[in-house]
Image (spheres, grey):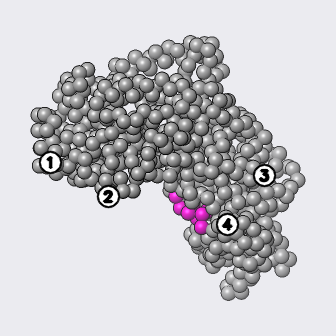
Amino acid sequence: MKSLARRDIANAIRFLTVDVVQEANSGHPGTAMGMADIAEVLWNDFLKHNPANPHWANRDRFVQSNGHGSMLIYSLLHLSGYGLTVEDLRRHRKLHSKTPGHPEYGITAGVETTTGPLGQGFANAVGMALAERKLAAEFNRDGFPIVDHTTYVFVGDGCLMEGVAQEAASLAGALRLSKLIAVYDDNNISIDGEVGGWFADDTPARFRSLGWNVIADVDGHDPKAVSEALALARQSQDRPTMICCKTIIGFGAPNKQGKEEAHGAPLGADEVALTRQALNWDHPAFFVPDDIYAAWDARARGAAQEAAWNELFAAYRAAHPELAAAFERRMAGEVSPAIMAWVEEEAQRIVITDPVKQPIRRASSRVAGKLAGLAAELIGGSADVSVSTLAWTSASRSITASDFSGNFLHYGVREFGMSAIMNGMAAHGGLVPYGSSYLVFSDYSRNAVRMAALMGLRSIFLYTHDSIGVGEDGPTHQPVEQIVALRAIPNISVWRPGSELEALVAWHSALERKGPSVIIAARQDGAVFAHGPSDLAGIRSGGYVLRQRGTGKPDIVLAATGSELALALAAADRLEADGLTVRVVSIPNGNLFAREDEGYRNEVLATGTPAVFVEAGSPLYWHQFLKGPGTVVGVESFGESAPGPEVYRHLGVTADRVIDEARRLLATR
């Protein structure tokens, strides 16, 4: 294509964008207008994709991390043939539209991940490139490169200001993810104006120092320069590539290009008309000429690319049938039947075995290690504390830059980056990532946990050191409000197991769930008690009657989670010695229990019976289950630096306190 013709083709993005944003009277036109020339070259000359099958396993992944400029990706999907109609575009930012304010995974075909919180899309892209490299190491065989694709990510100034991008970029460089190509939209503008006053980084030098291949000073409005940079980036064999493109935000708008006015608001009718004149776009709103549609149409090319891969995969299946079946199962997100069989056997073993005193994190680690041996898709990791969280199991083997055959990633002290990278792996498919840290540091990465829930991704967040039981490390390391904050996230499943059987169910549920799970495994010892055969079903419901000596309606209900089950059981023993009938209820997953039907919840909690809930954290969450007289023994202040048992006593989270509260409730009946 000639340069002028390419500009005309790219202008289709610009005018779909300005017209849609103008009609919606809301949106961000500047990014799409500024990156249109870059996007046109990438999507028409380099990107391997099939609009007829957005889920084709070996497609290139494209992530627009600067998701506020969502009309860029929506225009690309519309023009290249993904079935996103002009009417869909015109419903931009409206209820239940396919073109929401920011690109959302699962809403719009062709959108690989939800972006908007800046920097996370970039980190997701690192996860996708990592997944490609890992799956290639597992499945590719001589003559059969069935996993062979590139991840492209567009980033803006805001993305590179966010710390999560730095965390992810650092790890990507260390792991030499050569099939990751980032394109930096260096337009010098954010909402507040020219960024030079608060973003003076030497970005090329920064990324070179992180181990990236850097192609600097590319004119983002020169298709030839962009094409040459992308071609050079694809030749990199030992490191990811950052292409730094100078662009003009709002390119083509005579009075607003290069200014913050083009960033986050419609151009205005007069400016739209002037832009049409400036770019010689003599067409009405929402109209794209047939010849330009034809230049964008990727359906025939994409179908041919996928057909060639399908032919390769058919030969691969004939040569390596077991590998082919495993690849298809994993990309479909199906769990191996061997997992269920082992879980049932293991549950029976636990029930008939004498219970032992052990930290919950150790029970969790044993389960995770066995699952890692059975499920090759389970990829562990830790933010530098694997020996403390016990995320490193007997089955763990390190992934390194030179060897991706392992199943464990050392993320370094990068909790937020770890969590967002995990989401990228989960969105890519074929892997189920888990990553660990201390519970108090879930705050660092909570937005990535939230994004996993928003997208319904199968990411598993493992946290230990879960309460004031952390002890001597003091209040900076003792989580108080974190559990309730995590439980408050919609579409999350938060487990706080109190036994090995509960840990087993937590991990199995997390592996099968179509969404994220949090497993909170205490560093301190759990209670020592025997499970009954019926407990397995109760655990899967999120809450169940763990013990009641005597029949009929109890006098008092004691409900607890995690290591505080020991307090509830100890209190029950002493109350029973007074002749009371005590029901001990374990609620390892309040999210699941809250979704059970009311009849089941009422039966388990003997609704109307006085109840004491106990958990060494914020008590706020448990008040929803108090349907009669009751109270919550919890922690409503920060902790102290002292041995864990002493802190428990100091803050009144003890069996004695549970007994006192129970007797007070019974006395006021």
* Amino acid at the residue labelled 1: Glu
Q: Nearer the viewer, mark 4 or mark 1?
A: 1
At 75% from the left and 59% from the top, the residue drawn is 523
Residue 662 seen by the camera: no
Mark 1 burial class by Cα count in 10 Å: few <14, some 14-19, many 20+: some
Residue 169 shown left or right of residue 92 in the figure: right
- Residue 362's disc is 3
Say whether disc 4 or disc 3 marks the residue closer to the N-terminus.
3
In which quadrant of the rendered image does the C terminus lie?
A: bottom right
Considering depth in this image, is 198 or 534 the residue closer to the camera? 198
Residue stretch rendered in magenta on the structure: 481-489
What is the x, y in percent for residue 174? 59, 38
- Residue 192's disc is 2
Mark 4 burial class by Cα count in 10 Å: few <14, some 14-19, many 20+: many
* Amino acid at the residue labelled 3: Arg
At 88% from the left and 53% from the top, the residue drawn is 354
Residue 64 shown left or right of residue 602 in the figure: left
Say whether disc 3 or disc 1 marks the residue closer to the N-terminus.
1
Callouts 4 and 3 close, C-beta under 8 Å = no
Mark 2 burial class by Cα count in 10 Å: few <14, some 14-19, many 20+: few
